[in-house]
Amino acid sequence: MPSEDRKAWFVQTVEGKKHSLYRVALTMLRSTADAEDAVSDAVEATWRRFDNMRSDEALPAYLLRSTINFCHAYLRKHKRETATDDLESFLPPVHPETPVWMYLSGLKEKYRLPLMLRFSENMRDEEIAAVLRIPRGTVSSHISRGLKILRKQMEKEEKGRG
């Protein structure tokens, strides 16, 4: 059983990261209920393994990776599309005339998740690569391609208005 100091560290870390974890889960699952379930399961699973962690400093990354794993498991289990109506409530505010997050939600996950981690969570490519367990170069190319797709979609939308 963890000491009282470690329990407090765990609770403090979860409280500090909960919005980030929900944003990631919501980006992947596109439903607040499913995202809440995935984060709850990830926190519970992490708590069960907390005694065996070598470093308390690894906890934030471990929570994020665990959340992503539970989201993938949920998607494999349910293999269904969910509504995107709830997505905006967890995303950071953007200028009302720039519907970037609307376009972001339409991207494939391999582009959407690295972009969200970069711009919403301010993570570096190396951190994203570690969390997603993909090479740093892949992260960089997915971000680049995702931005290119977003740019094209926004330009197309702009031309349609004008």
Image: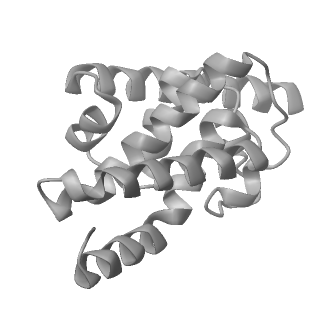
- For the C terminus, give its image quadrant: top right
Seen in the picture, residue 59 relative to 145 is either above or below; the reply is below
Residue most toward the front?
A: 1
Q: Quadrant of residue 55?
A: bottom left
Q: Quadrant of residue 134?
A: top left
Q: Quadrant of the image for the N terminus?
A: bottom left
Question: Does the image show residue 70?
Answer: yes
Q: Residue at x 47, y 37 (%)?
A: 68
Q: Is residue 109 left or right of residue 136?
A: right
Q: Nearer the viewer, residue 146 or 132?
A: 132
- Could you tell me residue 20's position as x and y percent? 50, 58
Along the line of sight, which residue is nearer the eye, 17 or 128? Answer: 17
Using residue 31 as the reference point, say whether residue 130 is left or right of it: left
At horizontal 68% and vertical 61% (from top left) the residue drawn is 95
Give coordinates of residue 8: x percent, y percent.
34, 81
Q: Is residue 118 visible?
A: no
Q: Within the image, what quadrant is residue 106 found in?
A: top right
Q: Residue furthest left?
A: 54
Whether residue 109 sits left or right of residue 141 in the image: it is right
Q: How is the image coloured?
A: one colour
- In depth, the one of 139 and 51 nearer the eye is 51
Query: In front: 133, or 155?
Result: 133
Q: In this rendering, is residue 131 above or below 95?
A: above
Horizontal and vertical percent position of residue 18: 52, 64
**Which residue sits at x=62%, y=40%?**
27
